Amino acid sequence: MTGQSAPTPPLILLVDDDPTEQLILKRKLQSVDGPKIDLEYVPDIGQAVERVSAGGIDLIFLDNRLIPNNDFRETAPLLRQAGFVGPIGIISSDISGAYFREFREFGVDFRMGKDEIDGNAISFIISEYTRDQLSETCAEDFL
């Protein structure tokens, strides 16, 4: 036995003013092949900022429109100002607006339509954005 504990599942924070989206995403996460993924849900940007400040979040799915804010151009910067350095993905029913092309300028890493979210997309996002960025050999040097 090596004495190492099991890796902690990645923790996704869903920020969406529609609580139904939490149920939908939770079901989709259950269909993901591979390690368990934990999900937390908050309905507004104020609670999201509080949760991010507490730490432990690996990835954020942020609904494009949250009341009273207009869209991600107002909300995503608040998460960055709160100290979140992990990936933020904007999710929306419609990502065809021209302003979605500017997403990186507001601290957002990716965007996707809610209809595009499935087990394969979630697996890809988790592996792409939350993997250990150091190689196995290099990572061992820091243990």
Image (tube, grey):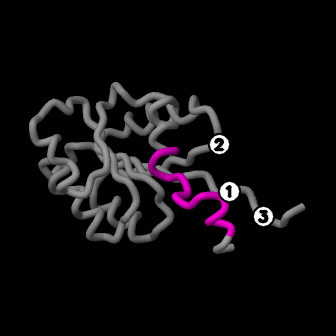
Which badge, 2 or 3, is on the more N-terminal residue?
Answer: 3
| Region rendered in magenta | 127-140
Does residue 142 lie above or below 94 as drawn? below
Residue drawn at 68 percent across, 67 percent down: 140
Amino acid marked by disc 1: Pro
Label 2 – label 3 distance at C-alpha = 17 Å
Q: Mark number for residue 7?
A: 1
User: Badge 2 is on which residue?
Assistant: 35
**Amino acid at dot 2:** Pro
Expressed as whole percent of the image width and height from the top left, the position of residue 29 reads 53, 36
Q: Earlier in the sequence, mark 1 or mark 2?
A: 1
What percent of the width, then of the height, locates residue 47?
34, 60
Element marked by disc 1: loop
Q: Is residue 126 magenta?
A: no
Residue marked by disc 3: 4
Are dots 1 and 2 in contact, CB under 8 Å?
A: yes
Helix, strand or loop: magenta stretch: helix
Q: Quadrant of the C terminus?
A: bottom right
